[in-house]
Image: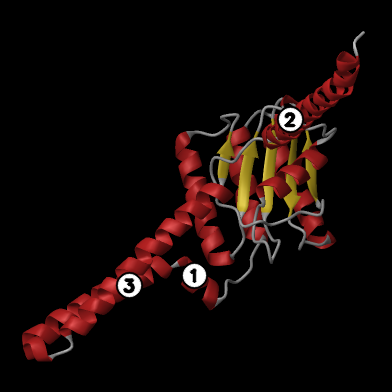
Amino acid sequence: MSPRILESIPMQLKKIFKTGLLVGIGLLILQIHNTQAQNQLDYPSPIDPYINDFSDLISEGTESILSEQLSEFQATQGIQITLVTLDSIYDFNTGDEDIETFARNLFNQWGVGDAEKNNGILFLVTPKDREARIQLGAAYGAPYESQMQNIMDGTIVPYFANNEYEVGITNGLNAIMDTSIETISWTDWVVYYKWYLIIGAVIGLLVAAGISALISGKKGWGYVLLAAAFGLLLAMISASSNSNSSSKRGGGFGGGKSSGRGATGKW
């Protein structure tokens, strides 16, 4: 073997090592990406902030009524309640062995409720498993957990045992709302109704600008009021655009967490 060939062997080994290293890094990155994607797909993604009836247990009419009630409840009481129906928790590759663990993890992944108050509630129904779970936000203590268990045992499970899921869900949600009362502050009220307030202010400014133009012509405050109304409209459009982007990312949830408290029912 010639000296030149012998000298070229270490260089070839270096090239092979570098190539193998790059391939290994690439495979590692791909594996991490696939793992992250799989983790994201383990649990179902929300389709609505209030009603996620994947098992089609309630009619469209009932779904519309309940969604409106839950939306109004969040507006007036500051508490988000979310219904989720799934055929079985074992249809998802989560590794969760029971409905308690699945409900807690689903709650935390979706971020049900307010991030600061942690007062959200998730109502999970799995007809194939014949189990249901009311999962509570981290702010709720043992007394409230006991109240939810009473609702589960006395109001929900008897109907589910007779396959009357729509009645059980409706009565259960109403009972949860009746028990979950928290007066909303005036600041929360302003935030919720901000669009109505802004639209009212714009209309008021336009009316005032018209009156000023009729009375004082160019010397009045008409142009100033008109400019203010135009500025409010631009601010509203910008805020609406940001809000839409945020809702697409967050799915209508506020980042709430659950520490594991809740009530389970079986039939």
- Tell me the tag on residue 232: 3
Separation of residues labelled 2 and 3 (CA atoms): 51 Å
Disc 1 marks which amino acid?
A: Val
Separation of residues labelled 3 and 1 (CA atoms): 16 Å
Q: Quadrant of the rendered structure where residue 141 is?
A: bottom right
Q: Secondary structure at mark 3?
A: helix
Would you say the residues marked 2 and 3 are in contact, meaning their CB atoms lie under 8 Å apart?
no
Total count of labels:
3
Q: Residue 95 in the image: state x and y as whole percent.
A: 82, 31
Q: Secondary structure at mark 1?
A: helix
Q: Quadrant of the rendered structure where residue 36 is?
A: top right
Q: Residues within 10 Å of mark 1 (few under 14, many from 20)?
A: few
Nearest the camera: 60 or 203? 203
Q: Is residue 203 left or right of residue 174?
A: left
- Comparing labels 3 and 1, the label whose residue is closer to the camera: 3
Q: Secondary structure at mark 2?
A: helix
Q: Residue 15 in the image: state x and y as whole percent.
A: 80, 24
Q: Which residue is mark 1?
A: 191
Q: Is residue 241 left or right of residue 122?
A: left
Q: Residues within 10 Å of mark 2 (few under 14, many from 20)?
A: few
Tell me which label, 3 or 1, sits earlier in the chain.
Answer: 1
Residue 234 appears anywhere in the view: yes
Identify the residue shown where x is 35% and y is 62%: 237
Disc 3 marks which amino acid?
A: Leu
Tell me which label, 2 or 3, sits earlier in the chain.
Answer: 2
The quadrant of the picture occupied by the N terminus is top right
Nearest the camera: 174 or 116? 116
Q: Which residue is mark 2?
A: 26
